[in-house]
Image (cartoon, rainbow, N blue to C red):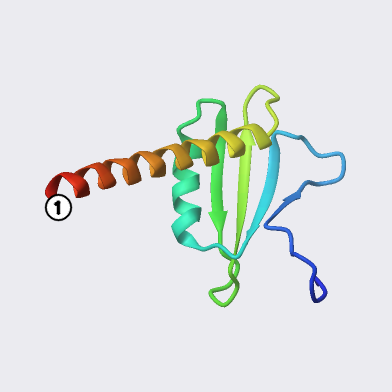
Amino acid sequence: MAGEGEKKAVLEMIQADGGDEGCVTFVLHDEDHTLGNSVRYMIMKNVDVEFCGYTITHPSESKINFRIQTRGGIPATEPLRKGLNDLNDVCQHVLNTFQVNLCVHF
């Protein structure tokens, strides 16, 4: 448990001892279905991803367990990073489009 003044990690990587880098569980703290489903969708668009799913262990916990399994020996960290970056790009596009249209109508 993080002490007072210490910052808790937002992302943890859980991998079995001697496990395959292409099959990893990531834990995202202080998140819920809003981010979980969006990131899962973006990761599943990657052709190198064989499986991506997430669970929320209990409704009172605000953490997501993400499981990513890749093809061809690609580390699971790569599609996670790409999925997060792609989601950020989509959100930025939506924000820019909204701001442009907001300025046009007011």
Quarter of the image for the N terminus: give it.
bottom right
User: Could you tell me which residue is drawn at 49 percent across and 45 percent down?
Assistant: 40
Query: Residue 91 versus residue 1: which sits nearer the camera?
Result: 91
Would residue 35 appear left or right of 99 to someone viewing this image?
right
Number of numbered markers: 1
Would residue 8 appear left or right of 43 to someone viewing this image?
right
Residue 41 x/y as whole percent: 44, 43
Q: Dot 1: what SS?
A: loop
Would residue 85 appear left or right of 69 to someone viewing this image?
left
Q: Picture quarter containing residue 21?
A: top right
Q: Amino acid at mark 1?
A: Phe
Q: Residues within 10 Å of mark 1 (few under 14, many from 20)?
A: few
User: Could you tell me which residue is drawn at 47 percent across and 42 percent down?
Assistant: 88
Residue, far right: 18
Residue 70 x/y as whole percent: 62, 31
Residue, far top: 72
Residue 84 x/y as whole percent: 54, 41
Query: Residue 70 versus residue 35: which sits nearer the camera?
Result: 35
Residue identifier under label 1 = 106
Q: Picture quarter containing residue 7?
A: bottom right
User: Could you tell me which residue is drawn at 28 percent across and 46 percent down?
Assistant: 99
Residue 66 x/y as whole percent: 61, 51
